[in-house]
Amino acid sequence: MVADLTPYAQDPLYGMDANDIPVAFWNQDLAGDARVGVPAQRTAKVLLWNETWADELGLASAPDTADEFRRHACRAQASMLTDDDPGNDALGGWLVNTDPMTAYAWMLAFGGGALEEGNYRFLAPGNVDAFKFLRELSESGCAWQSTAANPPSEFANRQALFISAELGDLPNVTRAFAVANNTDKWVVIPFPSEDGGVIAVFGSSYVILDASNEEELAAWLFVRWLLETEQDARWVEATHLFSLRASTLSLLGGYERSHP
């Protein structure tokens, strides 16, 4: 149903510089030797960490491992037991997020994943370790579930030291801190792992349906135009997702200053 875009991408006249696109994005659209698409948008599932609050709790740096993540989350939860409000005693640690990409990121952080030798396999040791860790985190009270379904607000009101988010959520978090009149510094961190941290990158891609040579080339030229730096920069400013080209960053200085 879809055209192999390899000849178009590599064409000396109509092709594009794949070296300008991060390998992690570019290789996601390969199926064997065929290129079935090219990146249209890429976002990521990340963790947000309240650095100011952590510093007050005596936690000087972001967690690099799962054990450090547990220590941070449990320290935040324990701090809730020291005030006069019994209603917040179950809060403070990681606000549980059951989004599939959050689960996938935790699986990757423990050396697991969804695939093994090209087939789906979820009952793998790394995945078991990941969900055992999360279950124990919840049973110890260091992770909690919310009925309000407003993680940015709960994060801004110091009800959670950690929340999970996607790149497009970050402006909402900034607004939530402004509404709460909270000047705490919060930062984006990867899911902690023994290998230095993991983020799960995903997003939509452009495909071209099988058609005549002329129609496929016309569609390819339109896709290539959409991926030029000027259009890529406009996408970033509108969606708050990753830029798809390294060269686009030179056009995003103003956006960076307004969206640190």
Image: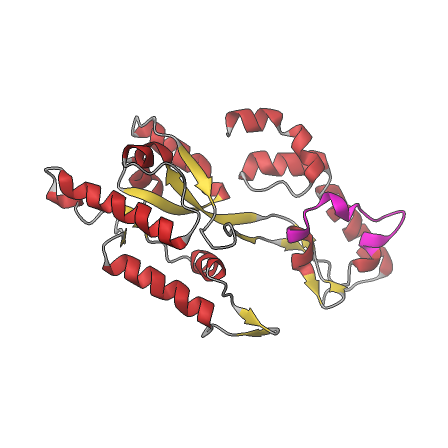
Visible in this render: residue 8?
yes
Q: Residue at x 59, y 24 (%)?
A: 254
Colour basis:
secondary structure
Position of residue 14 relative to residue 114, above or below, is above
Between residues 126 and 121, which one lies in front from this camera angle?
126
Position of residue 114 relative to residue 237, above or below, is below
The reply, left or right, for residue 213 in relation to residue 137 is: right
Name, please, the residue furthest toward the right. Answer: 13
Assign the N terminus to one quadrant of the image: bottom right
Visible in this render: residue 149?
no
The reply, left or right, for residue 253 in relation to residue 63 is: right
Residue 108: give x, y in percent of width and height.
Answer: 50, 60
Position of residue 25 relative to residue 60, above or below, is below
How many callouts does the rendering have? 0
Between residues 224 and 256, which one lies in front from this camera angle?
256
Q: Residue at x 26, y 45 (%)?
A: 75
Residue 208: give x, y in percent of width and height.
Answer: 73, 58
Give the image quarter of residue 98: bottom left
The reply, left or right, for residue 237 in relation to residue 250 is: left
Whether 44 is among the magenta residues is no
Residue 141: give x, y in percent of width and height.
Answer: 23, 54
Residue 47: give x, y in percent of width and height.
Answer: 43, 46
Between residues 145 and 112, which one lies in front from this camera angle?
112
Whether 20 is among the magenta residues is yes
The magenta-colored residue range is: 8-24
Q: Residue at x 61, y 74 (%)?
A: 117
Between residues 227 and 154, which one lies in front from this camera angle?
154
